[in-house]
Image (tube, rainbow, N blue to C red):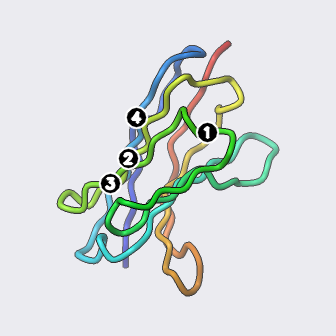
Amino acid sequence: QVQLVESGGGLVQAGGSLRLSCAASGRTFGRYTMGWFRQAPGKEREFVAAIGRTGINTYYTTSVKGRFTISRDNAKNTVYLQMNILKPEDTAVYYCARDSGVSGYDYWGQGTQVTVSS
């Protein structure tokens, strides 16, 4: 069983920055692609970013490219999401998840709230 715990959310003004962290339990963290998703009120959960096992390959949804950066530290079993130039439309609960590679994202964190005021 893998546990994912997000932290770092909060309230920030538009144009500000936040850094989200997701700490994973277990010894297999480095074997898996990790992703960040978000869900705004009344909307479906959407993909934000993902990072490959070694951290070399990264992927972003178009709306966050150039503003968000995903990274990981396999020694610390942690994946990060640096969010800059935040906009009110970035307001959502942010989740990290593990990509099983076969069955899609199989483990999810509890989420952390990000609120961007205008």
Compared with residue 93, is residue 78 higher up or lower down, i.e. above or below? Answer: below
Q: Which residue is mark 1?
A: 64
Give the Cα separation between the discs numbered 4 and 2. 7 Å
**Which residue appears at 71% of the width and 30% of the height?**
89
- Provide the secondary structure element on which disc 3 rests: strand
Mark 3 or 2 closer to N-term? 3
Q: Which residue is mark 4?
A: 19
Q: Which residue is mark 3?
A: 72
Give the Cα separation between the discs numbered 3 and 2. 6 Å
> Do callouts 3 and 1 mark residues in contact (Cβ within 8 Å)?
no
Mark 4 or 3 closer to N-term? 4
**Which residue appears at 42% of the width and 66% of the height?**
52
* Classed neighbour count for the residue bearing mark 3: other residues with Cα under 10 Å, few (<14), some (14–19), many (≥20): many
**What mark, if any, has residue 1 been given in the picture?**
none
Give the Cα separation between the discs numbered 4 and 3. 12 Å
| Quarter of image, res 7 | top left
